[in-house]
Amino acid sequence: MPVFVKKLLIVGAVGFLIFFMAFRPDGAAQLFKSIGALLMAIAQGLGDFLTGLMA
């Protein structure tokens, strides 16, 4: 992928996040809570898996 296209996509994504947080703060907060919960569930599952390997 050309560097220009990659930079354009990154700037667009950051701009969308800022717009989303500015005009839909409740929705943005819920989205970030959901992402955090997903990451915690993945970490918990990985920890359980590694614990199971050691037992």
Image (cartoon, grey):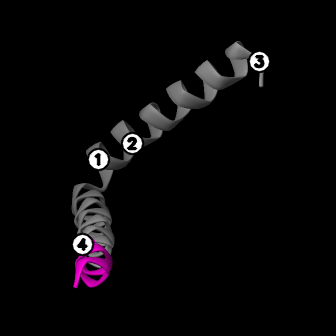
- In the structure shown, which secondary structural element does the residue marked by tag 4 occupy? helix
Earlier in the chain: of badge 4 and badge 2, it is: 2
Relative to the observer, which residue lies in front, 36 or 12?
A: 36
Q: In the image, residue 40 lies at what x, y percent?
A: 23, 69
Q: Which mark is residue 17?
A: 2
Q: Amino acid at mark 3?
A: Pro
Q: Is residue 33 above or below residue 16?
A: below
- Crowd tier of the residue under label 4, counting other residues whose Cα lies within 10 Å: few below 14, some 14–19, many 20 or above: few
Q: Nearer the viewer, mark 3 or mark 4?
A: 4
Residue bounds of the magenta highlight: 47-55
Q: Nearer the viewer, mark 2 or mark 3?
A: 3
- Cα separation, mark 3 vs mark 1, equals 29 Å
The answer to the question of whether label 2 and label 1 lie on touching residues, with beta carbons closer than 8 A, is: yes
Give the prevailing secondary structure in the magenta stretch.
helix
- Crowd tier of the residue under label 2, counting other residues whose Cα lies within 10 Å: few below 14, some 14–19, many 20 or above: few
- Cα separation, mark 4 vs mark 1, equals 32 Å
- Cα separation, mark 3 vs mark 4, equals 38 Å
Q: Which mark is residue 2?
A: 3
Relative to the observer, which residue lies in front, 47 or 26?
A: 47
Q: Based on the displayed image, in which of its 4 quarters is residue 46 positioned?
A: bottom left
Earlier in the chain: of badge 3 and badge 4, it is: 3
Q: Which mark is residue 21?
A: 1
Residue 49 in the figure: left or right of residue 12: left
- In the structure shown, which secondary structural element does the residue marked by tag 1 occupy? helix
Q: Amino acid at mark 2?
A: Leu
Farthest right residue in view: 1
Quadrant location of the C terminus in the rendered image: bottom left
- In the structure shown, which secondary structural element does the residue marked by tag 3 occupy? loop
Q: Amino acid at mark 4?
A: Gly
